[in-house]
Image (spheres, rainbow, N blue to C red):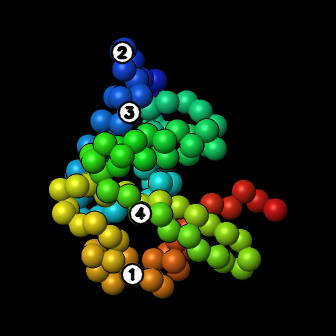
Amino acid sequence: MRMALSGERPMEDLMDRIEEALNEEPYRPWCLHRLCEEVVATRIPRDRDGLLRLTEQLADQLAAEGRAQREPVSALSIGVHCQDSLYWSVKANQHHLEEFGPEYEVPTILHRLASHMYCHGL
């Protein structure tokens, strides 16, 4: 069941929830899709594309305010372009993905990104 946000500050509340999720695992960056599915989609009903746009807007705002770190990632897989952003807690004291170790370095991160693309069917 999806819970709608209540109160006078629904977007700020959602930003706070994203920040809390990032802070729960400060040394594990979250991709935009994971933030969308595990934090935002459970609290506000919207179509998938609308949810992704909203999640990106809110997470980017957190990064702009210095409440989160962000790094964009882009990969091609079988001619399909996949672009994502990874976000993590400022508590990690890391400024680039590669600082999280080999699984976040190129080309490993690009293979991981390409493998999690969502299929909309044929």
Indicate which disc, 1 or 4, sits on the residue closer to the N terminus.
4
Q: In which quarter of the image is residue 97?
A: bottom left
CA separation in Å, label 1 and label 3? 30 Å
Location of mark 4 (residue) = 71
The residue wearing badge 2 is: 7
Mark 4 vs mark 2, CA separation in Å:
31 Å
For residue 105, what is the image quadrant?
bottom left
- Of tags 1 and 4, which is closer to the observer? 4
**Measured from the top left, where is residue 117 in percent x and y?**
60, 65
| Labelled disc at residue 105 | 1
Instruction: Left or right? Give the position of 91 relative to 110.
Output: left
Q: Is residue 80 visible?
A: yes
Q: Earlier in the sequence, mark 3 or mark 4?
A: 3
Foreground: disc 3 or disc 4: 4
Of the pair 119 and 109, the residue shown nearer to us: 109
Q: Are discs 4 and 2 less than 8 Å apart at CB?
A: no
Residues at marks 1 and 4 touching, judged by CB atoms closer than 8 Å: no
Front residue of 41/83: it is 83
Crowd around label 1: few <14 · some 14–19 · many ≥20 (10 Å): some
